[in-house]
C-alpha cells in the first residue's frame, strides 16, 4: 500500500504531462493534414487548368483548320477557271482531252464570230434598204438581195449566233463535268471485292419430251457486307 502511494504522485504527474502534450500533438497532426489536403487541392486545380488550356488550344486549332476541298470539286473549279486545267489536275488522258476541248472551243468560237459578223452585216443592210436615205445604200455584196431576203438572212444569222452561244455554254459545262466525273471515278472501287458481280453462266434447261440441255445466260451475284 505504501508502494502504491509512493508511485501515485509520479503517475499523476505523467498523466498531467500527457494530457497537456496530447493537444499539441493532435494540433500538429491536424495542421499537417490540412497542409497536405491544401497541396493536393492546388495540384488538382493545376491539372484541371492545364487540361482546360490544352482543350482550348485544340478547339482553336480545329477552328483554324479548313476542310480541304474534295478532288471532284477542285477539278471542276480548275476547269471553270481555265478550261483543261481540271483534266491536267486529274492526269487521266489529259494529253488527249485538252486538245479535244480546245478544238471544240475553237470551232464553236469561230462559228460564233462568223455568225455575229453575218448578223451585223445583214441587219445593217436591211436597215439601209428601208430607211429611204440616199446617203445610206446597200453594200455591193448584198445588192442582189431585196428587203425581205435581207431580213430572212438576218434572222437566220441571229438564230445561228444564238445556237453558237448555247453550244459554247454546253461545251464549257462539259469541260467542268468531265473533270469532276473523272476525279470522282478515280476513287471508285473497281477491285474484285465488289458488292455485285456480273459474269456469264451456263444454265441447265429441260422441256417435256426432250432431254436436258444447257443454255447460255448471265449470273448476277450480290454480296452483303
Image (spheres, grey):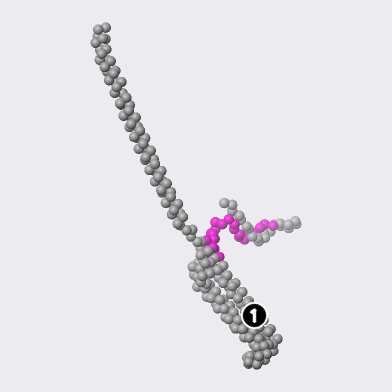
**Image point 66% across, 58% down: which residue?**
203
Is residue 223 covered in magenta?
no
**Image point 24% across, 9% down: which residue?**
3
- Where residue 93 sits: x, y (%)? 51, 70
Q: Is residue 202 left or right of residue 70?
A: right
> In front here: 218 or 37?
37
Asked if 48 appears above or below 98 in the picture, the reply is: above
> In front here: 85 or 52?
52
**Image point 39% across, 46% down: which residue?**
50
**Image point 48% across, 60% down: which residue?**
68
Q: Which residue is mark 1?
A: 158
> In front here: 77 or 15?
15
Part of the protein shown in magenta: 181-205
Label 1: element kind: helix
Is residue 200 covered in magenta?
yes
Residue 64: image quadrant is bottom left
Q: Is residue 52 left or right of residue 141?
A: left
Amino acid at each position: 500500500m505504501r508502494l502504491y502511494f509512493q508511485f501515485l504522485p509520479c503517475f499523476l504527474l505523467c498523466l498531467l504531462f500527457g494530457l497537456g502534450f496530447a493537444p499539441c500533438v493532435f494540433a500538429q497532426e491536424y495542421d499537417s493534414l490540412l497542409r497536405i489536403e491544401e497541396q493536393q487541392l492546388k495540384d488538382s486545380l493545376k491539372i484541371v487548368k492545364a487540361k482546360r488550356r490544352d482543350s482550348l488550344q485544340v478547339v482553336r486549332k480545329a477552328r483554324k483548320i479548313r476542310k480541304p476541298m474534295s478532288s471532284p470539286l477542285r477539278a471542276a473549279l480548275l476547269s471553270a477557271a481555265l478550261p483543261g486545267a481540271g483534266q491536267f489536275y486529274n492526269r487521266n488522258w489529259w494529253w488527249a482531252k485538252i486538245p479535244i476541248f480546245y478544238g471544240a472551243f475553237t470551232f464553236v468560237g469561230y462559228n460564233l464570230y462568223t455568225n455575229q459578223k453575218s448578223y451585223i452585216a445583214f441587219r445593217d443592210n436591211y436597215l439601209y434598204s428601208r430607211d429611204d436615205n440616199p446617203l445610206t445604200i446597200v453594200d455591193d455584196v448584198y445588192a442582189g438581195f431585196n428587203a425581205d431576203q435581207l431580213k430572212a438572212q438576218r434572222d437566220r444569222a441571229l438564230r445561228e449566233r444564238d445556237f453558237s452561244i448555247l453550244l459554247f455554254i454546253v461545251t464549257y459545262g462539259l469541260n467542268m463535268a468531265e473533270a469532276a466525273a473523272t476525279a470522282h471515278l478515280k476513287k471508285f472501287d473497281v477491285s474484285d471485292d465488289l458488292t455485285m458481280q456480273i459474269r456469264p453462266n451456263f444454265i441447265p434447261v429441260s422441256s417435256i419430251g426432250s432431254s436436258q440441255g444447257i443454255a447460255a445466260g448471265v449470273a448476277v451475284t450480290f454480296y452483303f457486307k
